[in-house]
Image (cartoon, grey):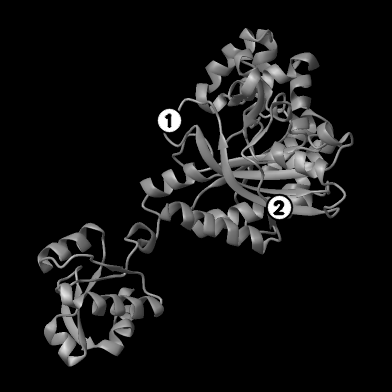
């Protein structure tokens, strides 16, 4: 939990510095709100809530647990359209649920950290979102990560150029989205299994391939030759790259034509964060200008990004990236109990130390000091404060540093200052 709160604190601080406002939504939604928004794979992973009471025996579902935070956001925008500003930026940090098979960094219940910008089609939106996400990762200590960028309309153009009929585009994108999991051969087989011709499949795989070291401008130049010199989607990608280069995203962007993002509500730019030596991403997002329209009846421009909190925590833990204060104990000093008569005095000392800003535990029983020290060590408490009969008579406190065994006696009124100075 300390690690979780550390990451959430960094995320919240960065997002608010970019002008995003907080939002929370209920854990469950009407099932109709969620179904049909995530593609065929997503629909299978929705946790459904059976009808209750007299309808329980029907085995039908009318509610479902949140699958993500984006569709509930779209529902909120439609529901409160008259109370929200024309341009609205929100962040949301809450759990979501998916009926998935648990694995390393993959859970059935996990937190997402979302940022979304509503009301503008400007590429400034994508650049700002990417900048905020990169700020989060840099502050958490990540290095060498890459921003993968693509566009849904570019994917459609490449599929058309390869000879894939429009009716099969969704099938092709579902297969392509599995590239990281099943590899090129697996995607080739899945293309064919989904009714896409062998010839079209080969052309697709050739079009989607981009060398990891290829500069974005080179990829965009090839796209203009393949699609159209004036293609709007390519121009939009170029604008996002250009704007992002003026932020802390500079040097991190890679236009990756194999990036598909399986959620069916994306309409424009799509993006993911790739970290070296990590299967999968730390988060992803994109533009979804039509999603709000499913609830409102008219389209509203929208773009967002979601960071996977649990995956970030797993990676940071494995790589030893958390600060010592986060990975260490939750207590700065433990006040020992000399004997039963000293209980009130020990409580008073603990009170004074807490008022000074220290995190203080107090041993509840008059036990041997050795046992009390052992307990403090088991909780990674760096210091113990001892007030025996002699210390009480002299108005002092003995402070023992359990990290190196050093023990010093200080005036009681100076104990807090002494501990704060040595805590770091």
> Considering only vertical position in the picture, is 259 above or below 315?
above
Query: What residue would you read off at disc 1?
Result: 103
Q: Secondary structure at mark 1?
A: loop
Q: Is residue 248 above or below residue 269?
A: below
- The residue singled out by tag 2 in the image is 90
Q: Residues within 10 Å of mark 2 (few under 14, many from 20)?
A: some
- Write the residue at 38% across / 48% down: 317
* Image: 218 above or below 93: above
Determine contact: label 2, label 1, CB under 8 Å. no
Tell me where residue 417 sits by quadrant: bottom left
Percent of width and height locating residue 56? 61, 18
Residue 367: x %, y % from top left:
13, 65
Q: Between 255 and 140, which is closer to the camera in this rendering?
A: 140
In the shown orientation, is residue 16 left or right of residue 242? left
Of the image marks 2 and 1, the number of the one nearer the N terminus: 2
Marker count (numbered): 2
> Is 310 situated left or right of 344 in this image?
right
Quadrant hosting residue 335: bottom left
- Residue 392 in the figure: left or right of residue 172: left
Give the number of the disc on residue 135: none
For the residue pair 280 and 341, the one nearer the viewer reads as 341
Q: Is residue 170 visible?
A: yes
Residue at 71%, 54% in the rendered image:
128
In the rendered image, residue 64, in percent from the top left (x then y), is placed at 63, 29
Q: CA distance from mark 2 to mark 1?
A: 30 Å
For the point 62% across and 19% down, the residue is 175
């Amino acid at each position: 939990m300390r690690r979780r709160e550390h990451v959430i604190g960094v995320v919240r601080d960065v997002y608010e510095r970019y002008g995003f406002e907080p939002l929370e939504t209920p854990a469950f939604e009407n099932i109709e709100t969620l179904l049909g928004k995530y593609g065929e794979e997503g629909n299978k992973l929705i946790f459904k809530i059976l009808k209750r009471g007299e309808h329980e025996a029907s085995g039908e579902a009318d509610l479902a647990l949140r699958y993500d935070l984006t569709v509930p956001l779209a529902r909120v925008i439609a529901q409160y359209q008259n109370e929200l500003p024309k341009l609205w930026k929100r962040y949301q940090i809450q759990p979501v649920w998916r009926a998935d098979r648990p694995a390393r960094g993959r859970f059935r219940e996990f937190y997402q950290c979302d940022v979304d910008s509503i009301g503008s089609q400007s590429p400034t939106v994508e650049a700002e979102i990417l900048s905020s996400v990169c700020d989060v990762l840099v502050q958490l200590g990540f290095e060498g990560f890459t921003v993968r960028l693509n566009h849904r309309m570019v994917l459609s153009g490449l599929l058309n150029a390869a000879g894939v009929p429009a009716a099969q585009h969704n099938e092709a994108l579902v297969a392509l989205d599995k590239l990281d999991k099943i590899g090129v051969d697996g995607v080739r087989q899945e293309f064919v299994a989904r009714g896409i011709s062998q010839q079209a499949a080969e052309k697709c795989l050739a079009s989607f391939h981009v060398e990891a070291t290829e500069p974005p401008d080179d990829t965009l130049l090839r796209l203009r030759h393949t699609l159209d010199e004036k293609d709007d989607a390519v121009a939009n990608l170029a604008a996002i790259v250009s704007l992002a280069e003026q932020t802390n995203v500079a040097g991190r962007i890679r236009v990756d034509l194999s990036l598909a993002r399986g959620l069916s509500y994306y309409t424009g730019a799509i993006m993911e964060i790739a970290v070296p030596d990590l299967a999968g991403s730390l988060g992803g997002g994109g533009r979804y200008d039509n999603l709000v329209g499913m609830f409102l009846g008219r389209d509203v421009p929208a773009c967002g990004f979601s960071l996977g909190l649990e995956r970030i925590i797993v990676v940071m833990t494995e790589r030893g990236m958390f600060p010592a204060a986060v990975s260490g104990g939750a207590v700065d000093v433990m006040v020992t109990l000399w004997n039963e008569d000293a209980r009130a005095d020990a409580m008073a000392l603990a009170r004074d130390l807490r008022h000074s800003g220290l995190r203080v535990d107090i041993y509840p029983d008059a036990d041997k000091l050795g046992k009390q020290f052992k307990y403090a060590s088991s909780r990674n408490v760096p210091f113990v404060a001892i007030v025996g009969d002699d210390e009480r008579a002299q108005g002092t406190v003995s402070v023992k540093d359990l990290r190196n065994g050093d023990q010093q006696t200080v005036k009681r009124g100076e104990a807090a200052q002494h501990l704060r100075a040595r805590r770091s």
